[in-house]
Image (cartoon, rainbow, N blue to C red):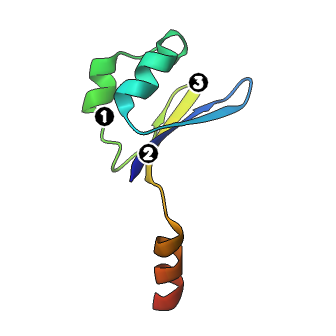
Amino acid sequence: MKVFVLIQQKPLQVKTYTSLTALYEANKDILEVSKSKLDKYPFDRFDYVNHKIVISKTIALTTGDVRNMQKEQ
């Protein structure tokens, strides 16, 4: 499952969301970026970074995913 991780730098806080819309709606007062810009941002290639926040798109791993990766090594 894909998740978006919001890291607020000061004070340090880490929050996770299953959609970019949820992340935006919960934090629009601190993001200093439009929803349109975030919708167009290439999260598959780069993290979004500004002076206050970092937004990263990642994949949440299940126990089965981890065990399968360990078997492949």
Query: Identity of the amino acid at label 2?
Result: Val
Residue at image point 52% right, 27% down: 50
Mark toward the start of the polypeptide (2 vs 3) = 2
Numbered badge on residue 11: none
Whether label 2 touches label 1, CB < 8 Å: no
Give the CA separation, mark 2 to mark 1: 15 Å
Residue sitting at x 41%, y 39%: 18
Label 1 to label 3: alpha-carbon separation: 17 Å
Please say if the residues under marks 1 and 3 sit with CB atoms less than 8 Å apart. Answer: no
- Residue 30's image quarter? top right
Which residue is the site of mark 2?
3
Write down the residue under mark 3: 51
In the rendered structure, which disc, 2 or 1, sits on the residue that comes first in sequence? Answer: 2
| Picture coordinates of residue 28, whole percent (x, y) | 47, 14
Q: Is residue 60 left or right of residue 19?
A: right
Which quadrant of the structure image shows residue 52? top right
Question: Mark 1 — residue?
Answer: 41
Q: Nearer the viewer, mark 2 or mark 1?
A: 2
